[in-house]
Image: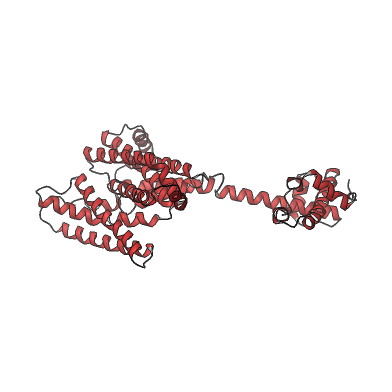
Amino acid sequence: MSGPFLDAFLAALALQAGYNSALVAIGAGLLGAAAGAGGTFLFLRKRALVADAVAHATLPGIGLAFMLMVALGGDGRHLVGLLLGSAVSATVGLVLVEWTTRRTRLAEDAAIGAVLSVFFGFGVVLLTVIQTMSSGRQAGLESFLLGSTAGMLYADAVTIAVGGAACVAAVALLRRPMTLVSFDPEWAAASGVNVRGVDLAIMGLVMAVTVIGLKIVGLILIVALLIIPPVTARFWTERTERVVWIAGGLGGAAGYLGAALSASAPDLPTGPIIVLVSFGLFALSLLLAPGRGVAAALWRRRRFQLRVHRRQGLLALARGEPIFDGLTLKVLRRDRLIRPDAVATRAGAAQAAKVLRDEKRWEVARQLYRDETISGRYDGLTAIEAVLTRDEIADIDRRLGPPTPVEGAA
């Protein structure tokens, strides 16, 4: 990263890169937070593709709103008018998906595919027609496809910032019923929650985020901002409520950092940069998250593998069997259970006797306690003291007789 670029990036982060850039960064941060939190409910409801259909259904509304504003004497580029047009066509697309799913035998994915492709195709036709019009200011209208903040006016930035803040406020107000319906709609209905109404509120929130994000992220990429942050947040927590806030934070960070990066160099597209930052956060979480990350999974697998080799090595020592496996020998030497010549140390002999004794205890326990709660706990690695009481173990020991010492220990 070059010096001037770093200086420009730090200035953009500190909101010192110009008034409009600061407003865009704040608006993108708020939009990202709203998209992350709102997208969580779609993610939990397993309706992520609905966001894609809503986003693509906005394109005809943009084209028709442009034509209407030109017909009324304007230049057709008023952002609020274009967003209102996109909201209307997105609503029509969403209603069509819902109606097709409920009133026909088509599955939701088929309805989404049909609405998405038809509306997007219609929108492309409208944009092509608009380019042939002699009136209006058509230049840059295609930026709604991938997003762009170049040439954004102060009023546009304020509109996006206010819209993002309103979406964040809506998430904060409706978080509890939305979480309830997303996690368990049957239980929510039994608790008196209006599931249908909350579902519509979720769709309305997603539509609002989509419409507000058209100028910055674009209709093709806005779905990434709705889905990637919740998926990323899922790596960091098992609790649903925390997923909402973590996803909101990650989405906000991606929007703010992406907008700052885009403002740091000319010709850097804002929408794709925001999506790439969001993916970077996802990749880091995939690798480093303590519970579900790849590194944590590899570490758990390695620990399990070493525990298995340790136990098998101790059983071999207790039974007087030779050990040929290199990793088993390495583990036993590391824990000072055997000497370099593979003879058991005193500690190794004691632990080998204990492992062999526990193995016999488990055999008796599985005969005495045939219910799955006890016999199902046997995996060769769980200590029997963690499953049975002292009295139960003492009873098993009386049946087994005295323990057998390990021969050949140093």
Residue 220: x %, y % from top left = 32, 54
Colour convention: secondary structure
Query: Which residue is outermost to the bottom?
Result: 105
Is residue 109 toward the left or the right of residue 353 in the image? left
Total marks placed? 0
Specify the quadrant of the image occupied by residue 1.
top left
Residue 393: x %, y % from top left = 81, 47
**Residue sitting at 80 percent across and 43 percent down?**
390
Is residue 137 toward the left or the right of residue 90 in the image? left
Residue 23 is at least partly visible in this image: yes
**Residue sitting at 27 percent across and 63 percent down?**
118
**Residue sitting at 20 percent across and 58 percent down?**
127
Is residue 29 toward the left or the right of residue 141 in the image? right
Q: In which quarter of the image is the C terminus?
A: top right
Above or below: residue 39 compared with residue 324: above
Q: Nearer the viewer, residue 341 or 226?
A: 226
Q: Nearer the viewer, residue 172 or 300?
A: 172
Q: Nearer the viewer, residue 410 or 95?
A: 95
Residue 337: x %, y % from top left = 81, 46
Residue 257 is at least partly visible in this image: no
Residue 262: x %, y % from top left = 33, 42
Specify the quadrant of the image occupied by residue 153.
top left
